[in-house]
């Protein structure tokens, strides 16, 4: 629908106003080849349009072979000066871009803070549609940033606000994330977490969500590693992916942090 609308508009400010939502819709739909020309069109607009183009590039591809984290961070900070503070959707997009770049730079706390601000903006607007790529990263970043009780309180708030509008897949993802948080905090056993994860994997495979199923296999491998059950870890890794030592090291730091609190 956005594509048809923009096709009817002449070049200019009104057309550029529609481009950000269209780019994000194309990105969510996996149609990345169509986004470049639209972002370039934004870059031909005014300061606010160019700032939006920077944010969209960060959201779509935070780092590429010709860029660096520091260079992209400087460009994003400059773009932030032109964000209209009276436009909450633009502010939310800026916070999402900040979160994506901070996560890539290894600053989980900054990433969590930015995602939390984005969540609070969307919540204040009653716009659940603005959170499609915020909810799960927000919870994941909380594992590195706040206590187990705060993480679970945040999940209570998210689940309460989304209600039945979360849909079965997101609801199941939230339930799995809750279980992983409870396991990291020592509130449930490894066996309880394994049983929960296996049920979730079965659902994901039935719905064709294979990438998410791979992520859960990685969770099972991590549980096996923490428990010293290397044989179970090897069985988990007979799936389509093997956990990297980098992600394992990052997650064990969050485990230690949560269990200390």
Image (spheres, helix red, strand yellow):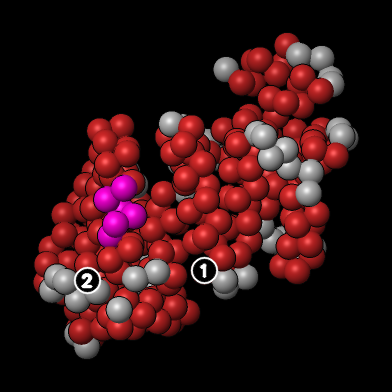
Q: Position of residue 1 (x, y in %)?
A: 57, 17
Which mark is on residue 183?
Answer: 2
Q: Residue furthest top?
A: 8
Residue found 79% across the figure and 62% down from its top: 74
Which mark is on residue 109?
Answer: 1
> Which circle's residue, 1 or 2, is located before the other in the chain?
1
Instruction: Please report the bounds of the magenta region as a residue range.
Output: 152-157
Above or below residue 199? Residue 37 is above
Instruction: Classify residue 190 by image quadrant.
Output: bottom left
Q: Position of residue 133 (x, y in %)?
A: 48, 46
Q: Is residue 91 left or right of residue 113?
A: right
Q: Secondary structure at mark 2?
A: helix
Dot 2 alpha-carbon crowd within 10 angstroms: few under 14, some 14 to 19, many 20 or more: many
Q: Is residue 185 left or right of residue 55?
A: left
Q: Residue furthest bottom?
A: 228
Relative depth, front residue between 131 and 217: 131
Residue found 63% across the figure and 29% down from its top: 22
Q: Secondary structure at mark 1?
A: helix
Q: Residue 199 colored magenta? A: no
Q: Position of residue 64 (x, y in %)?
A: 72, 60
Q: Position of residue 181 (x, y in %)?
A: 27, 66
Above or below residue 9? Residue 227 is below
Above or below residue 249? Residue 157 is above
Relative depth, front residue between 50 and 211: 50
Mostly what secondary structure, the magenta segment? helix
Q: Is residue 64 left or right of residue 212?
A: right
Residue found 26% across the figure and 36% down from its top: 163
Determine the CA span between mark 1 and mark 2. 21 Å
Quadrant location, the C terminus: bottom left
Residue found 60% across the figure and 65% down from its top: 102
């Amino acid at each position: 629908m956005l594509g048809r609308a923009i096709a009817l508009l002449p070049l200019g400010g009104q057309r550029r106003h529609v481009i950000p939502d269209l780019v994000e819709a194309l990105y969510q739909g996996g149609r990345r080849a169509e986004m470049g020309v639209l972002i370039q069109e934004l870059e031909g607009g005014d300061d606010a349009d160019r700032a939006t183009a920077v944010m969209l590039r960060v959201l779509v591809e935070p780092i590429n072979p010709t860029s660096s984290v520091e260079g992209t961070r400087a460009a994003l900070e400059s773009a932030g000066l032109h964000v209209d503070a009276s436009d909450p959707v633009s502010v939310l997009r800026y916070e999402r871009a900040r979160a994506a770049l901070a996560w890539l730079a290894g600053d989980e706390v900054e990433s969590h803070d930015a995602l939390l601000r984005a969540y609070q903006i969307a919540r204040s607007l009653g716009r659940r549609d603005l959170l499609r790529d915020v909810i799960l990263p927000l919870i994941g970043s909380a594992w590195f940033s706040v206590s187990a009780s705060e993480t679970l309180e945040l999940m209570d708030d998210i689940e309460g606000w989304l209600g039945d509008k979360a849909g079965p897949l997101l609801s199941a993802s939230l339930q799995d994330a809750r279980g992983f948080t409870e396991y990291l905090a020592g509130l449930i056993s490894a066996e309880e977490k394994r049983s929960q994860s296996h049920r979730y994997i079965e659902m994901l495979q039935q719905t064709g969500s294979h990438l998410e199923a791979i992520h859960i296999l990685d969770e099972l491998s991590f549980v096996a590693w923490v428990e010293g059950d290397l044989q179970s870890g090897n069985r988990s890794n007979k799936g389509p992916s093997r956990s990297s030592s980098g992600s394992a090291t990052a997650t064990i730091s969050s485990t230690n942090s949560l269990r200390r609190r």
